[in-house]
Amino acid sequence: MNPGDRLDQVVDKDLPLKENIRLLGRLLGDTLREQEGDETFNLIESVRHTAVRFRRDGDEQARAELQAMLCGLSHEATVLVVRAFTYFSQLSNIAEDLHHIRRRRAYQLAGSLPREGDMARALQQAADAGLGPEELQSFFSGALISPVLTAHPTEVQRKSILDWQREIAALLDERDRLKLTPEEEVLNEDALRRGILSLWQMRILRELRLGVQDEIDNGLSYYRTTFLQQLPRLYADIEDLLVARWPETRFRIPAFFRLGSWIGGDRDGNLYVTEEVTRYALARQSSVALEYYLAQVGQLRMELAQSIRLVQVTPELMTLAARSPEESEHRRDEPYRLALSGIHSRLTATRHELDQYAAEPTAVSKVEPYVDPEDLGRDL
C-alpha cells in the first residue's frame, strides 16, 4: 500500500463523520436564520469563518478581525453567538460519539482481533499469561468496580437537553444503520430539525439551583437510561466470552460492578443533607431498581404465554403459578404468566412498602412483599 492509498483510507474512514457534522451544522444554521433572522445568522457565520482562518492558517489579520468583531457585540448578540457555538459543539460531539461506535462496529464486522480495552482482548491476554478458568473465576469473585455519582455534575445539566441529545443521536444512528427510502430520509431530517429547534428554544442552564431532592431524582435518571440496561449485558457478555474459551467450565459472574452515589448522603457540611433527605435518597434508589424489575417482569409476562397443554414445566413452577393472585380464566393454562403475575404483585408490594414517597399504587393485591433479594431470586 502506498502513502496515497493510506490517505484515501483515512479520508473514507472519516467521511461519515464529516457528513453528519455538515448535516447538523446546516440544520442548526437553518434554525438560526428562521428563529433569529438573517442578520444574526450572517454574524455567526462571519465569526465562524474568521475563527477558522485564524485557527487553520495562523492568520494574525483574522485574529485582529475576530477580536474586534467579538468585542463590539452587544450583550444580546454575545449570548446568541455563545449559544450557537455551544450547540454546534454539542451536536458535533454527538456525531463524534456515533463515529466511534461506527468504527468499533466496522472493526468487529471485519473480523479483526479484539481492540485494546475490549473485554475480549483482556481475557485473551489473561489466557496468554497462563491464567485458567479457576483463577479468572476467583478474580471476578473478589473484584469490585464502584463508580460514584456526585451531585455536582447534575446541578446545571438539564434532563430535557440530555433527552433531546439522545433523540438526535438515535436519529443519526438510524441514518447510519438503515438504507432509508427518500420518504424516510425526509422524515428523519424533519425529526432532526425539530430536535435542533427544540434545543435552540430551551435554556441551556438551570436558572435556579437544584434542591437536594431534585438532585437525587435527577441523578437517578441516569440509572434508567444507562446502568440498568447495560450492566446485565456486561455480565452476560463476560460469561459468554469465558464459556466460549473454556466451554467445559460453568462460570457465575457476581455483581462486581457496584454503583455508588453521594447525592443525598454526603456529609461534607451541606446543611440541606439531613436524615430525612438521606432516607428519601435510599427510598428513591430502591424504587428505581424495583421499577426496572417490574418493567422487565411485565415484559416477560407478555412473552411467556406457553400453554400447559403444549409444554412441560417443573413442579416448582406449578407451585409458583398456583400462588399467583391472577384470577383471569384466560390464564388458567398459562403457568409462566401466572407465576410472573405473582412475582409482579409481590414486587409491587415490596416497592410500596419500601418507598414511602411513591404514589399509592393502584390495585395492590394482598400479597406479601419480598423479604430480601434472595427471596426474589428464588422465584425467578
Image (cartoon, rainbow, N blue to C red):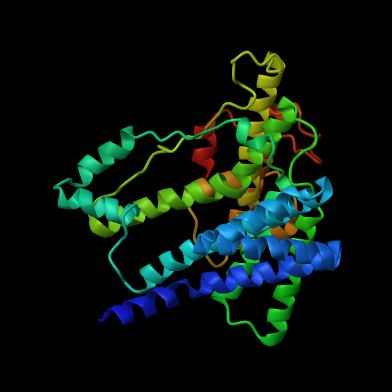
The residue lying toward the viewer, choosing from 310 and 251, is 251
What residue is drawn where x is 21% and y is 42%? 134
Q: Is residue 103 left or right of residue 220?
A: left
Image quadrant assignment for residue 193: bottom right
User: Where's the N terminus, which quadrant?
Assistant: bottom left
Is 52 in front, or is 242?
A: 52
Corner quadrant of residue 287: top right
Quadrant in the picture for residue 206: top right
Please give the name of the residue rendered at 28% of the width and 59% of the height, measured from the top-left corner.
244
Provide residue 254's location: percent of width, then percent of height. Answer: 39, 39
Q: Measured from the top left, where is residue 137 in percent x and y? A: 27, 41
Which residue ends up furthest to the left in the rendered image?
130
x and y percentages locating residue 156 in the rendered image = 69, 37
* Residue closest to the eye, 16 or 258: 16
**Residue drawn at point x = 21 percent, y = 48 percent:** 126
125 displayed left or right of 154: left
Q: Is residue 346 above or below residue 96?
A: above
